[in-house]
């Protein structure tokens, strides 16, 4: 499951890059740890606001964190933070 998440996050970053949204690269070995760190605090993921402006929050880390394929990788707090960020930005499921 973790490998699928890492691959999906990498694919989303590539798609975002094609839209002109710059995101820091994440090393495979620390990807899940980094994702949990971002989702556990007040820091939003790279490119979140730009993706929101482009109507592509589906490419954000937050969207992956609430994707039913990957919810088991995150704590309730991390998933709730992701969900609240998405809802606050007007994301439609």
Image (cartoon, grey):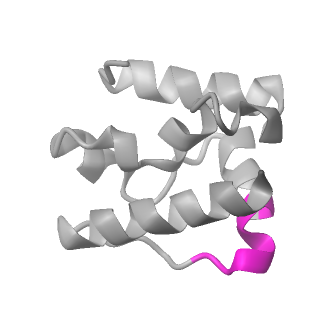
Residue 77 or 28: which is nearer the viewer? 28
Write the residue at 75% across / 53% down. 37
Say whether residue 42 is magenta: no
Which quadrant of the view contains residue 78?
Answer: top right
Q: Is residue 76 above or below residue 43?
A: above
- Image quadrant holding the C terminus, namely top left
Q: Give the x, y percent position of residue 3.
A: 73, 63
For the record, the magenta segment spans: 26-33
Which quadrant of the view contains residue 46?
Answer: bottom left
Query: Is 26 on the left or on the right of 31, as rendered?
Result: left
Q: Is residue 23 above or below residue 38?
A: below
Say whether residue 27 is magenta: yes
Query: Is 27 on the left or on the right of 14, as rendered?
Result: right
Write the residue at 44% across / 48% down. 60
Residue 22 or 2: which is nearer the viewer? 2
Q: Is residue 87 above or below residue 13?
A: above
Write the residue at 49% across / 76% down. 24
Which quadrant of the view contains residue 28?
Answer: bottom right
Q: Give the x, y percent position of residue 21.
A: 26, 66
Q: Give the x, y percent position of residue 49.
A: 31, 46
Q: Give the x, y percent position of residue 36.
A: 76, 49
Query: Is 19 on the left or on the right of 82, as rendered?
Result: left
Query: Is 87 on the left or on the right of 15, as rendered?
Result: right
């Amino acid at each position: 499951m973790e490998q699928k998440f890492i691959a999906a996050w990498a694919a989303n970053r590539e798609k975002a890059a094609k839209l002109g949204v710059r995101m820091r690269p994440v090393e495979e070995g620390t990807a899940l740890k980094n994702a949990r760190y971002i989702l556990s605090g007040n820091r939003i993921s790279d490119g979140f606001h730009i993706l929101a402006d482009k109507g592509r929050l589906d490419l954000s880390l937050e969207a992956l964190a609430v994707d039913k394929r990957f919810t088991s990788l995150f704590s309730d707090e991390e998933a709730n933070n992701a969900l609240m960020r998405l809802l606050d930005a007007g994301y439609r499921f």
